[in-house]
Each structure stands twice: as structure tokens, then as C-alpha cells.
Image (tube, grey):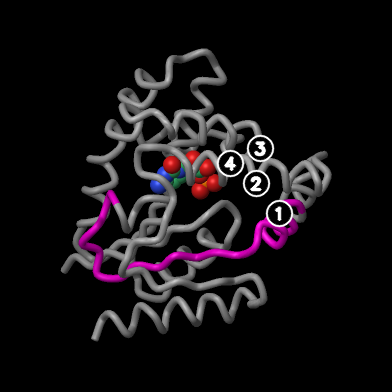
Amino acid sequence: MAFTIAIDGPAAAGKGTISKAVAAHFGFAHLDTGLLYRAVGAKTLAGVEAIAAAKALVAEDLEAEDLRTPEVAQAASKVAVIPEVRSALVDFQKAFARRAGGAVLDGRDIGTVICPDAEAKLFVTASAEVRAERRFKELQGKGGDQGYEEVLADVKERDKRDRERATAPLKPAADAVQIDTSEMSIEAAVQAAIAAIEARRG
Ligand code: C5P
């Protein structure tokens, strides 16, 4: 049986952690759709044209190293503005969403564009400062050299681009349950997400 859980929200709000935990809890497959845009962004940094890169994307590209760097994140949000890049990635995401056994997809437009009929939709947010603090610590843990202020500016720039683009902008679906994780522990946020999904499962 197919059951789709759509989890959207801005950068570093906790979507990734929540999505992995929710997928493990329900025994569903998980797709981090940001990786698709990061893989295309990384190709443009290597000189490939964005639309051609999106059309030629294969599953192995999602396993490329260094997709988690701030440079690739910025490149991803730039290619994500291009309608032809987005449309080239739609079929893969939709097929993943309807796979038998259930699926969790996290991104920016899953509940609004990719899976408007998803059985459960969450919109995970947190203040820009809290998100930048989390991302700063994560990058520091990996030996990154960005300061907090730089990470905050990066997060705000990417949010603005994601929210203001004409095609599939970042916004909550009308029927999404919103979870603000600013003052929540990871455990509490995961529990809130699971409770919201259980309520939709009936
Ligand atoms: O979620 P993540 O930070 O990996 O996403 C990188 C970028 O990819 C985002 O800033 C956004 O511009 C883009 N993206 C998107 N739609 C999605 C997932 C990611 O536009 N469903």
C-alpha cells in the first residue's frame, strides 16, 4: 500500500532528522529531495549547464561526495529557481512517493507541488537564528571554517531565494501541520511529527 508523507520547510529546520526518524518509525523509504538539487548544483560548479545536468541526473549522482557543503547549497538554490530544472526532477520524485510500502519525501515543494495528495503533510520551521546555530555547529563538527554570522547570512539568502521564486516557492500547503522546532529537542520534534502523522493515518 502506498502512503506518502510530505515534509517541507526552510534550510536546517530539522526536516532531515525528522524525516529519517519518521521513515524508520513507520518502516517507509526516505528521499531527501534537496540532494537532487544539490547534485545538479554541484554539476554546474563543475561547468555543466543546469538544465542538461538535471535531465541527465542518475541515482548514483546523489551519492557524490561533498554535496553537503555551503557552496553546493547555494548552487542548489540557484538551479532550483529554473522551471526546466524542476520539471526534469518531477517524475523521479512522484514515482518514489507512490512506491509500495510507503515513502517520506522532504524538501520545499513536496506538499504543494510534487505530492499535493500526500496522506500526511508537515511543515517544519524554526527561527533563522536557531537554524543558523544548528547548521554552524554541524559544519564546525565537519571542520568547516564558516563563522556563525556567515552561516546566518547564507541561510537567510537561501530562504529568500526559495520563498520568492516564481515556480514552486517554499510555503506550507494549506493542509500541512506546522511544527516550530525552535524550542524543541530533537526527540520532542520527532514525537510531534509522529503524532501528527498517526492522526492522519486514522
Ligand atoms: O534541503 P537542502 O538544503 O538540501 O536543499 C538545497 C536547496 O535545494 C534548497 O535551498 C532549495 O533551493 C532546493 N530545493 C528545492 N526543492 C526541494 C528541495 C530542495 O527547491 N524539494
Q: Quadrant of residue 174?
A: bottom left
- Name the residue beneath numbered marker 2: 155
> In the shown orientation, is residue 28 left or right of residue 195?
left
CB atoms at circles 3 and 1 under 8 Å apart? Answer: no
- Name the residue beneath numbered marker 1: 132
Secondary structure found at label 2: helix
Question: Which amino acid, mark 2?
Answer: Val
- Name the residue beneath numbered marker 4: 158
Check disc 4: other Cα within 10 Å, few if <14, some if 14-19, many if 20+: some
- In the depicted structure, whether residue 120 falls above or below residue 149: below
The residues colored magenta run 113-136
Nearest to N terminus: mark 1 or mark 4 = 1
Foreground tag (4 vs 3): 4
Real-space Cα distance between discs 3 and 1? 12 Å
x%, y% of residue 55?
A: 30, 24
Check disc 1: other Cα within 10 Å, few if <14, some if 14-19, many if 20+: many
- In the depicted structure, whether residue 11 falls above or below residue 192: above
CB atoms at circles 2 and 1 under 8 Å apart? Answer: yes
CB atoms at circles 1 and 4 under 8 Å apart? Answer: no
Q: Residue at horizontal 59%, vertical 71%? A: 181
Real-space Cα distance between discs 1 and 4? 12 Å
Nearest to N terminus: mark 4 or mark 3 = 3
In magenta segment, residue 67: no
In magenta segment, residue 120: yes
x%, y% of residue 69?
A: 65, 37
x%, y% of residue 15?
A: 51, 61
Nearest to N terminus: mark 2 or mark 1 = 1
The circle on residue 70 is: 3
Q: Is residue 35 visible?
A: no
- Out of 105 and 180, give the one closest to the viewer: 180
